Amino acid sequence: MRRALPSQDPNDPDYRRLCYVRYADDILLGFSGPKSEAVEIKESLGEFLRSELKLELSEEKTLITHARTEKARFLGYNIVVQHSNDRITRGRRSVNGVVGLRVPEEAITRRSALYMRRGEPAHRPQMLNDQDFTIISKYQAEYRGVVQYYVLASNVYRLGRLRWVMETSLLKTLASKHRATVSATARKY
């Protein structure tokens, strides 16, 4: 006797899907179904962790969000479900329902703050005794590390603001070291 397979139609009221991703102690569950069942899954997971593994779920970090209207934070990325009626590929709306990774705005602001003082890019006095090559290499390595981490994001272009802040800070650091103007330093390098 053949058993019927569950429907693949997301509009079917009995359609359910549960996917998960784990990295170290961070877990992201993606669930298609009613919120009440998502709450039950969260409670069951919390009970299992408590009874079997003697671990506790962090209530402030363990959130249930609706992926179409809210974003979830996982490993420094914002996780969203993309929706666009304009983007058509081969006669179909190609991004609807697709999970997307985004660079959080606060991550850009937080990283930019390391190179700013009073709201503007500033020089880094701790580097004034280093060689020019060393100063430039440090800035490049720091920027490259951020970009390589967020390269999977669909809005990685937003790191352009961080690039401008870091580049201006670099020029101000070199200008301060050589007692020159920023524009002269920019022309030189």
Image: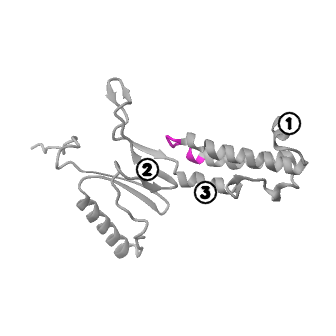
Q: Secondary structure at mark 2?
A: strand
Q: Pointers 1 and 2 in contact (CB under 8 A)?
A: no
Q: Quadrant of the N terminus?
A: top left
Single out the mark in the foreground, 3 or 2.
3
Taking the image as shown, residue 138 lies to the left or right of residue 154, namely right
- Answer left or right for 19 relative to 155: left
**Residue that extends furthest to the left in the rendered view of this protein:** 1
Magenta stretch in the rendered image: 149-155
Up-down relation of residue 136 to residue 56 (above or below): above
Residue at the (56%, 46%) spot, across then down: 150
Residue 31, x across and y down, in percent: 30, 53
Q: Foreground: 161 or 97?
A: 161
Residue drawn 53% across and 51% down? Answer: 105
The residue indicated by pointer 1 is: 188
* Residue 60 belongs to magenta span: no
| Amino acid type indicated by mark 3 | Arg
How crowded pointer 2 is (Cα within 10 Å; few <14, some 14-19, many 20+) is rated as many
The kind of residue on which mark 1 rests is Lys
The scheme the figure's colours follow is: one colour
Work out whether residue 133 or residue 166 is closer to the camera in this orientation and state it: 166
Instruction: Give the image quarter of residue 3.
Output: top left
**Marks 1 and 2, how far apart at CA:** 42 Å
70 to 26, vertically: above or below? above
Which residue position is annotated with label 3? 110
